[in-house]
Amino acid sequence: MNRRQILADLSLLLVTAIWGGTFVMVKEAVSAFPVFAFLFIRFTLAALSLVPLWPWLERRFHFFRPEGAKRGPRALAAGALLGLALTAGYGFQTFGLQYTTPAKAGFITGLSVVIVPTLAALLVRKSPEPSVWWGVILATAGLALLSLNRDLRPQFGDVLVFFCAISFALHILITGQLAPGHAPLLLTLGQLATTAALSGAISLLWEWPWPPLNRQMLFAAVFTGLLASTLAFTVQTLAQRFTTPSHTALIFSMEPVFAALFSFLVAAEPITTRTIVGGSLIVAGMLVAEVAPVMWARRVFPERG
C-alpha cells in the first residue's frame, strides 16, 4: 500500500466521520420536514456553493486538474450518472423505511460493504484481496450486532432497502471507475446538481405542499450541504482515484460507529455493550483490510539492511 492510498483511505474515513456526525442533525431535521424536500435544499445549496469555488480551486491546487482528465459536458454527464445512483439510494431507503424497521434498514443499507466487492468481481472482473473479504465478514458481523434484533422476518420494505444498498454500492463502484478519468470538481458538480434536480422532482410529485421552513431545518440543510455534500463528495471523488471501491465500502461501514459516538456526545444516547462489540468488529474489519496486506508484504519482501 503506497502513501497515496493511505492518504486516500484516511480522507474517506474523515468523510465517514462527517456523515456519522451529521446523523442526529439530519434525523431531527426530517422529523418535521419532507425527506426529499430537505435533500433538494441540501444538494441545491451544495451545487451552488461549488460553482464559484470550482475555477479558483482548479487554479490554486494542481490535483483538481489532473492531466488527461475529461472536462466540460462529458464530466458533468458522468457526474449525472453518479447523481442518479445516489438519488436512487436515498429513494429506496426512504420508501423502504415505511415498511420496515430503522434497525433492519440500517443493517441492509450497510450490506453495501458486501455488495461492492461482489459486484466488482462480477462486473469489472476485479476480485478484492483475501484480506478485504475477511474485513467484509467482520464488518458485516459488526453491522448485524449494531442493527438487528430478534425480528429477522423479511418484509416488503426490506426488499426496497436492499435496492438502496445496491444503489449505494453502484455509486461507489461507478465513482471508482469514473474518478480517474474525469475532472473531479466537474464530476462532483454534476453529481450534486443531478441529485438536487431529481430530489426536487420527487418532492413536487409526492411531498408538495411543503410545510413552512424552520430555522432548525435550514441550519441542517446549510451545514450538511456544505460539509456533508460539497466537501464530502469532492473528497470521495478525489480519494477514489487512489484507492479501491472495496476499501471505500469498508471504510464507509464505519458510519454507524461514528453516528453512535456522536449521538452519545451530542444527544447523550447511551452506548450499549452491543454497540461497543459491533463497532469493534467493524473497526477490526477495516484494520484487517488495511493492515494485513502491508504486514504480508513486509513478511514476504523484508527490507534489506
Image: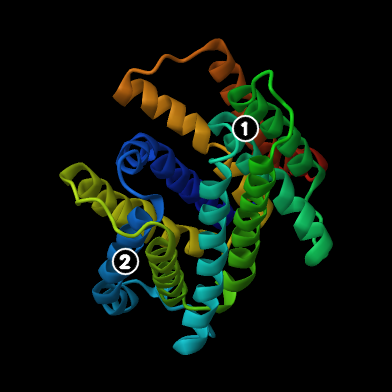
Q: Residue furthest top?
A: 273
Q: Measure how far apart labels 1 and 2 are at the Cα level.
A: 30 Å
- Please give the residue where the numbered disc 1 appears in the rendered image: 104
In the figure, is residue 219 to the left or right of 299?
A: left
In the figure, is residue 23 to the left or right of 59?
A: right
In the depicted view, which residue is nearer to us: 21 or 251? Answer: 21
How would you rate the neighbour count of disc 1 (Cα within 10 Å): few for under 14, some for 14-19, many for 20 or more?
Answer: many
Q: Earlier in the sequence, mark 1 or mark 2?
A: 2
- Please give the residue where the numbered disc 2 appears in the rendered image: 44
Q: Is residue 44 above or below residue 262?
A: below
Quarter location, residue 149 = top right
- Identify residue type, mark 2: Thr
Where in the figure is residue 288, as x and y percent of width and height?
A: 69, 34
- Identify residue type, mark 1: Lys
* Callouts 1 and 2 close, C-beta under 8 Å: no
Q: Residue furthest left?
A: 215
